[in-house]
Amino acid sequence: MPEFLDHLPEGTAADLADTLDRLAGFGVALARRIARGGLDEALDTAQGSNADGDTQKALDVIADDMARAALDGGAVRYLASEEQEEVVTLGAGTLALVIDPLDGSSNIETNVSVGTIFGVYPAADTPEASVLRPSRELLAAGYVIYGPQCCLILRVGEGGVLKYVLDPETGRFRSLGEIAAIPTESSEYAINASNYRHWPAPIRAYIDDRVAGTEGPLGHDFNMRWIASLVAEAHRVLTRGGIFLYPGDSRKGYAQGRLRLVYECGPIGHLIEGAGGRASDGTLPIRDRQPRSLHARTPFVFGSANKVARVATYHDLPESEVSALFGSRGLFRS
């Protein structure tokens, strides 16, 4: 019986079940560590840079070390982490794990929900072949969100998306069963509007139609959300529907956005599709993307299936036509 999860889908292979339970145990331990925020202030706020050059807090490194410790002696042979420059070999196991140990750590001091994102593949002959593959080949994917509730969201294989809630009394994740499908209708969208001037024309046109509200072609008002924590954004979309957009833009270093394909977008896309939604790079399914490097970035759009499909429709127009066609604000009405 798993130690930290009270239920897994019937037929889950023993090596995968053990790995998922170890990840749940890591989530329990990290939830406790995050809850101590402020008690170890100097440790929590110290900063450096990770392997990809992004700002890294001491807690990012602590989370990475905790994840490796939790996996020690288990079935994971190769580990690909945001905090490591290359894929790490842990042992002679059968699986490969991709992980962002602590996504959104820059929000820690503001008490905004942060999370852990992970995906599990079968191990291949080499470290690179094990993790540089389309996320449609994932055996399982999920995230832990550390917020008012500590939840584990998990999809095993091509099954439904399961929700677990951490019971602080027992230190175990209790299953609440399969979540409902992502709602089709929602008036929420999430994007960092401060970058509007840098976006490609199709994204500007898509957002313009929503900003226009009742006076625009869609005929009703929308609410914009932006948390700057990918796990929190995904959790809201899974719960309430809507759409999240992080496009590439014209700034130096942002042509492919800033989110990582291997250990952020791939696993989140796996979950979103499992709940009936869609995830893309703006035009093509994110789960079909072939990563070229461990820290490869990609534009990322996910949410209610009809809304993600609509973004792709905006991209189908030649850029020279976008301004003229959308100037009338009447091309698309759904």
Image (cartoon, rainbow, N blue to C red):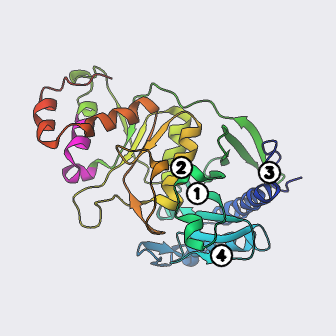
Which x, y percent locates residue 259? 42, 59
- Evaluate whether residue 75 shows in this view: yes
Per the image, the residue denoted by label 4 is 65
x 77%, y 41%: residue: 175
Count of picture labels: 4
User: Mark 3 or mark 1, which is nearer the start of the sequence?
Assistant: 3
Per the image, the residue denoted by label 3 is 5
Q: Which three-letter amino acid code belongs to the residue tagged 4?
A: Asp
Labels 1 & 2 near each other (Cβ < 8 A): yes
What is the magenta range?
A: 194-208
User: Mark 4 or mark 3, which is nearer the start of the sequence?
Assistant: 3
Q: Which three-letter amino acid code belongs to the residue tagged 2?
A: Ile
x 33%, y 37%: residue: 311
Q: Secondary structure at mark 4?
A: helix
User: Mark 4 or mark 1, which is nearer the start of the sequence?
Assistant: 4
Per the image, the residue denoted by label 1 is 117
Q: Which three-letter amino acid code belongs to the residue tagged 3?
A: Leu
Q: Is residue 65 left or right of residue 315?
A: right
In magenta stretch: residue 34: no
Tell me the number on the disc at residue 268. 2
Which x, y percent locates residue 275? 58, 35
Secondary structure that dominates the magenta span: helix
